[in-house]
Image (cartoon, rainbow, N blue to C red):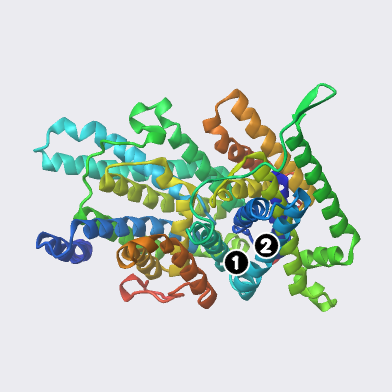
Amino acid sequence: MTFLKNIGKAVVPILLLSVPVMYLSSREILNPYWVQIYQQACVVAISALGLNLIYGFTGLFSLGHAAFLGAGAYTAALLTKLYVGAYGDEAVLATAAVFSGSLLAGGIAAAALAFLVGVPALRLTSDYLGIATLGFGVIMKVLFDNADTFLPSMGGARGMTGIPRLTGVPWAAGGLVAAVLVMRNLVHSSYGRALVAVREDETAAAATGIDVSRYKVIGFTAGCAFAGVAGGLYAHLYAFLHPSTFDFLKSFDVLMIVVLGGLGNMTGTLVASFGWVFLLEGMRVVLPPEYIEFRWVLIPLLLIVTMLARPQGLFGLREFPLLRGRVYR
Amino acid sequence: MYALIALGYTMVYGIVRLINFAHGDVFMVAAFLALYSIERFHLPLPAVIAVSAGGAALLAVLIEAVAYRPLRNAPKIAALITAIGVSLFLEYFTALHQVFGPNYYAFPRPFDVVSLDAGGISFTNIQGIILLVTLASLGSLQYVVHRTKVGRAMRAVSQDMVTAALMGVNVNAVISFTFALGAALAGIGGVLYGIAYPQINTFMGVMPGLKAFTAAVLGGIGSIPGAVLGALIMGQSETMTTAYLSSTYRDGIAFVLLIAVLLWKPTGILGKLRTEKV
């Protein structure tokens, strides 16, 4: 019974998040553009949750999140490009299987990369870790830019095309719900407690028997796996990948979302992700065309004002009831 | 030239422990100031440098007072995010048509390029001027930091802000001065950049800013000779990569180098080990 109950816990929010949107779009109340933005917000939220796990919960200052997003995106896209056509367009189930498989593969690739980078780099602390991961992000971008020299289908600086457009509202919403559930369970497990302990005080954590460097690598790898899955969804949402989507400035975007929402706070990350994406796109609609450039003038101003007014993030430590653990900090 | 920008980063970081992401954009604004003072007012080169350095210093002091000072006791990340915000704001605000505009602008050469030859090493007079101005700025910086009262106050604040305040140092004034000094150097860097690569736009500060920061970290952040050393290493390795490998890998090599050095010596080449206080 508990198994069924747990399944229900996952299915209900997926339905809640996807059915209204799909209904509205099928009745043409919501135009396809906004549906796409909705999915993009889901993707951004998944990747931001990952960074929140890394920075918010484990306290590792990473400025290279977009690189892992890119690693997942390219991996997943390469796989679907290879295998989706193989079963013909009719094989819906096979396509879905391949897609979920390649999303997983994207997550695993990002995690593997994170492991390789993390084991040596996580010895660094605070700002030095930040600049090292930032450097890693730039290196990855250079690699993506030059990728066509060793794998022509990745397109290099011209961008990767011909990716099947598989991500739909249920996929995006499903991915988000799965991410939230995994994240919630992880954070409130003994692993999650250990991660928070590492963030709060490494010496004290080590004294209570926590293997600090092991948990740092766990937190970093898991967070990057989220980014990898998000990247896979992103690739199949826009069916086009370009290295500039994954440069270090995009890592800043995710970082801003996480900090705006509040570090170590899932509610904040979710709200900030959706707020961020819809604000960006909403201003495109609201502002008259000749003032469209003001978008990026207003957003930083908003950011600065928010930070000055609420340095601890919009939500501080408050969480939605659903996301709380049994023992609330 | 990286050295001039790197110095600003390292000084600010040494004192307030903040990666000042807006520094690269202060550099950009200085380059535009130089452009206008040459094109509209036909000022001679020393005056241009003075205008740019002064303008940059003013801007940095303003940024510090408005955006960073209220957050000095807040979590460090809040200040960092604000710095990113300031940086984005400067870039996009100045890219508006009403301000500088989003295009690339040609930077007028204040003099003709002449190729010189000294003992088998050939260089242009532009490179010569850059070298001279850089050396002069570094020399005066060393003098200010080590031989003047403000310099002593700066070093005191960087060691322990609270104790320095108790000893009668006006911490806010010193921090403002540090920002101004760092920005003035970046301003000079901006003019030199305009002379060396005669095309500027409002996003030109991003990559040099990032690389200068990398250079500062490479050399050991907070250390002035370290910043210069790091900048020299970066400049050399980039030129070498372009020459022997491919220019598409140029932006990557600096960071490969950085990560290698950080793994070998986590506080940079000339950095001091700083134990975290509990």
- Point out residue B53 in the picture as x, y percentages from the top left corner: 72, 57
The CA span between labels 2 and 1 is: 8 Å
- Point out residue B215 in the picture as x, y percentages from the top left corner: 67, 45
Q: Taking the image as drawn, is residue A178 in sight?
A: no
Q: A137 or A116, which lies in front?
A: A137
Residue at the farthest right position: B147
Q: Is residue A24 left or right of residue A71?
A: left
Task: Report the quarter where the C terminus of chain B lies.
Answer: bottom right
Q: Which mark is residue B88?
A: none
Circle 2: residue type: Arg
Circle 1: residue type: Lys
Q: A291 or B148, which lies in front?
A: A291
Residue under label 1, please give it: B76
Q: Which quadrant holds residue B228?
A: top right
Q: Is residue B129 left or right of residue A99?
A: right
Q: Which mark is residue B17?
A: 2
Q: Is residue A85 left or right of residue B254?
A: left
- Point out residue B224 in the picture as x, y percentages from the top left corner: 78, 51
User: Which residue is at 18% across, 60% downward?
Assistant: A31
Residue at the farthest front position: B41
Q: Secondary structure at mark 2?
A: loop
Q: Chain of mark 1?
A: B
Q: Chain of mark 2?
A: B
Q: Taking the image as drawn, is residue B26 in sight?
A: yes
Q: Are marks 2 and 1 in contact (CB under 8 Å)?
A: yes
User: Which residue is at 81% across, 42% downward?
Assistant: B132
Disc 2 crowd, CA 10 A, few/some/many (<14, 14-19, 20+): some
